[in-house]
Image: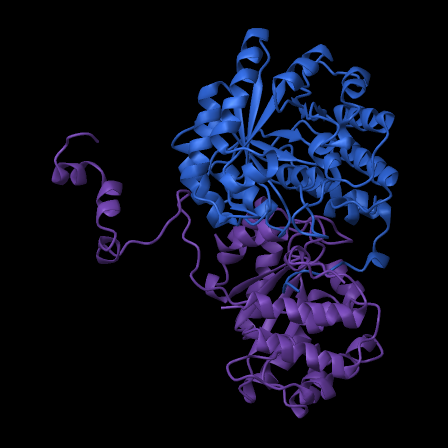
Amino acid sequence: MGNVPTTVKHCLSYEQLIQDYPWLRRWLLLEEKTITGHAYPKFVKIVEVGPRDGLQNEKEIVPTGVKIQLIDMLSGAGLPVIEATSFVSSKWVPQMADHSDVLRGIQRAPHVQYPVLTPNLQGFQDAVAAGATEVAVFGSASETFSKKNINCSIDESMLRFEEVINAARERQIPVRGYVSCALGCPHEGHIEPSKVAEVAKRLYEMGCYEISLGDTIGVGTPGSMFKMLQSVMKEVPTSALAVHCHDTYGQALPNILTALQGVNIAKVIEAGDFICSALCRETNSKVARAKGRTL
Amino acid sequence: MAAVLRLVNRGTLSSAMGQQYLTFSSAPKVQAVGVRAGQALPERVKIVEVGPRDGLQNEKTIVPTETKIHLIDMLSASGLPVIEATSFVSPKWVPQMADQVEVMKGISRIPGVSYPVLTPNLKGFQAAVKAGASEVAIFGAASELFSKKNINCSVDESLQRFNDVMKAAKEAGVPVRGYVSCVVGCPYEGKVAPEKVAYVAKRLYSMGCYEISLGDTIGVGTPGSMIEMLEAVSKEVPISALAVHCHDTYGQALANILVALQMGIGVVDSSVAGLGGCPYAQGASGNVATEDVVYMLHGLGIQTGVDLSKLMDAGAFICRTLNRKSNSKVAQAVCKL
């Protein structure tokens, strides 16, 4: 600004003031904002779903010992929540047949949660018997997906979940709710944001402490993610929401970024290496591949 | 092993159903949706397709000339407005581009589509013009070490060399696009100062480049570092003259492109099928796939002029020829390799 006296410079340019006296930022209680005006959260809780949602969709049946070791390595990486297994009938999901052994076998790190899926009261009771301290229920924003996936309508599934949630409340066990097909359904196609909001609201009001909104087939893009979140945030507080983005069309990270506006990466990569060796397959993580951790 | 990645069980989806999902990506009636309230994204984005040059240059298999020509023709047919055709660099250094003249002469040029070529020096420029080039490109680096190791001279020396090309291009009325590499990180220096990127971008712009493409050469950028860099550069070069060339080595490309769009940048470089690996990270990917970029842009209601289906045909063609899987997730999802 040439030969303008310092004090005048500061009056004319707020940026100049902060540049010359960076410590003032704290005194002025300023939020660190980027040029685009976003204030990103300072901390993000990552819910690791690999051992359950991940392995459930792998063709090869993974030995119990391997599952336990994977979960222990993930605990070692500092992840705060690790979905351990699913108390669903082994007829339907053979990969999760060893649910009780897995839950009993893992080393539980303090301050880490190990939620398990409990689709019905039977599953819930088995989970509690095996030592579960947090459970999860799965709803769908699509009627057709609900019928094809769990053989009942959305309303019927909510009744089942209510039983689980009530039983969980009696034992003071927190319940996480999932809404699948939040951005699109393989059968119905486009899903109305208002429907997602309706299902999310029901799960929240029934007593789920957090609702994870899942783009089950990964068709979402930042625009549709934004619209859906806008709708849901009218019914459920933002602090109770999570996003579960699938990367089927490579859109997961921009979708997560849209949703956002102390994990030790090296350790997560080791855990990733381990399970990929066990499964004899390449990692889907680009970070791992870039760090030379292909199989 | 990210928490939110998983492959959809392919068995549940037929390829016909896969085609249906492309409709999620077309939102012609939707206005460009600001990702945050009050944030206006551009209504149109110009995609600069670098597959035939930057992509193929980093593929091990030497591709026959007719294949390159056919690829470029298919890309032209898909509606892409700019297709980087080849590079007039010495075939000693880049054997893949040895057929530069035949490619230039062999392609069917669509009116309104640009076919820029790389010209690292005056000799290359003259050969390019002789072969019919009507737009050229020059490359600077924001990292001194990268410049020395890549082209054997300092950043300032490289900009001096380009002076000759700029002068000749001005006389011939040929527009020049400038590239800056290592805008976020360098494989040798590590983190690159945003001010250095701004300096090089400004020099190229003042020399007469109509557009400056900012390249995250090793893909280490994340939205935060991208914004920091773009803030510095946009102080020296108008946003309308800037483009982003994001590599997907760490899976961050689309997120980085999104924040660039939020800052008002309207030009994105990408490579069909994500052609071109990263020479600095064995087994890693490099260029971001054009199909994935187009999917995101169309989903946001942003116009590109590109027909995603035809683009995917081009991607499928080159992957079959190279006998490799596509790096595009959209292509993989729709089961077209």
Q: Does the image show residue B301? A: no
Residue A51 versus residue B6 in the image, above or below: below
| Horizontal side of residue A26 vs B202, given as left or right | left
Q: Quadrant of the N terminus of chain B?
A: bottom right
| Image point (67%, 41%), residue name | B287
> Which shade is chain A?
purple
Rendering quarter of residue B99: top right
Q: Nearer the viewer, residue A150 or B42?
A: B42
Q: Quadrant of the C terminus of chain B?
A: top right
Q: Position of residue B210 (x, y in %)?
A: 52, 20
What is the count of numbered marks?
0
Q: Nearer the viewer, residue B261 or B284?
A: B284
| Horizontal side of residue B230 vs A277, given as left or right | left
| Image point (87%, 37%), residue name | B321
Task: Please give the letter of the chain rendered in blue.
Answer: B
| Horizontal side of residue B109 vs B211, given as left or right | right
Q: Position of residue A72 (x, y in %)?
A: 64, 80
| Image point (52%, 37%), residue name | B261
Residue A143 versus residue B281 in the image, above or below: below
Q: Position of residue B315 (x, y in %)?
A: 79, 37
| Horizontal side of residue A265 vs A91, given as left or right | left
